[in-house]
Amino acid sequence: QKEVEQDPGPLSVPEGAIVSLNCTYSNSAFQYFMWYRQYSRKGPELLMYTYSSGNKEDGRFTAQVDKSSKYISLFIRDSQPSDSATYLCAMNLKAAGNKLTFGGGTRVLVKP
Amino acid sequence: DSGVTQTPKHLITATGQRVTLRCSPRSGDLSVYWYQQSLDQGLQFLIQYYNGEERAKGNILERFSAQQFPDLHSELNLSSLELGDSALYFCASGQVGQPQHFGDGTRLSIL
């Protein structure tokens, strides 16, 4: 079993809808949580970074962390066709330097 | 643009060969990380350097090695290449305790 699980999708939504993505993890020692967006033939681009349970909002993006359930989510409001990409969750242990453990990524398609 | 530069963008070579991938980190970042992305394994951490010294190692094969130079750029050396080494190789850089920023990767194709 992988340390971080993420539904591969694809997740297809109409433009303007809310996109809901999530990851579950098994290692309760993970302390820092990130969401990256990856377009085809590009590197992962950092979207959100958080280290505490609760919600963090940045524009159309909201990251949610529930450490007690070992579950993190990303919500994208008012989705646009330009949001079509693969979304990767990542997390790390402070004690292990900054080594990131990634989920497998969810492919999202926003249809105009 | 993340500020992390990787060259070359694409490498095509044959089994048994050796290649070198290069990474220039963002200005001011002392840490460089290398990751491998393949269809079946996803993004996997290979190795981290901090200010010229190896800091952490992941599941990096013995045929692979890396180094970070005094100007903080890093190179990943892959030798005795096998078909299964075909993948995207990403470099990321960051400050300790801060999130990492990724380059656009080098696509390695082994024929």
Image (cartoon, coloured by chain):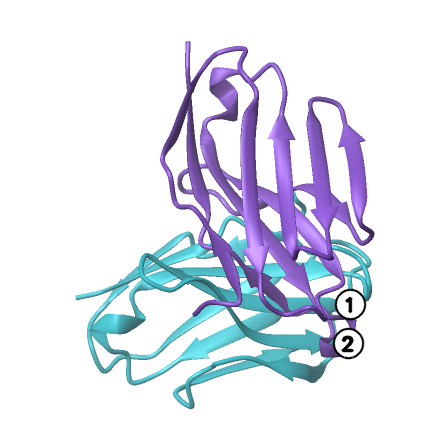
Residue B30: give its label: 1
Q: Residue at x 28, y 79 (%)?
A: B81
Q: Position of residue B109 (x, y in %)?
A: 26, 61
**B41 on left or right of A103:** left
Q: Is residue B105 above or below residue A8?
A: below
Q: Quadrant of residue B51?
A: bottom right
Q: Are marks 1 and 2 in contact (CB under 8 Å)?
A: yes
**A43 on left or right of B79:** right
Please state, as top left, top right, bottom left or bottom right, where the N terminus of chain B lies in the image.
Answer: top right
Q: Is residue B51 above or below residue A74?
A: below
**B106 on left or right of A36:** left
Q: Position of residue B49 (x, y in %)?
A: 68, 76
Q: Give A45 or A108, whichever is nearer the viewer.
A: A108
Tint of chain B: cyan
Q: Is residue A23 above or below residue B87?
A: above
Tint of chain A: purple
Residue B51: give its label: 2
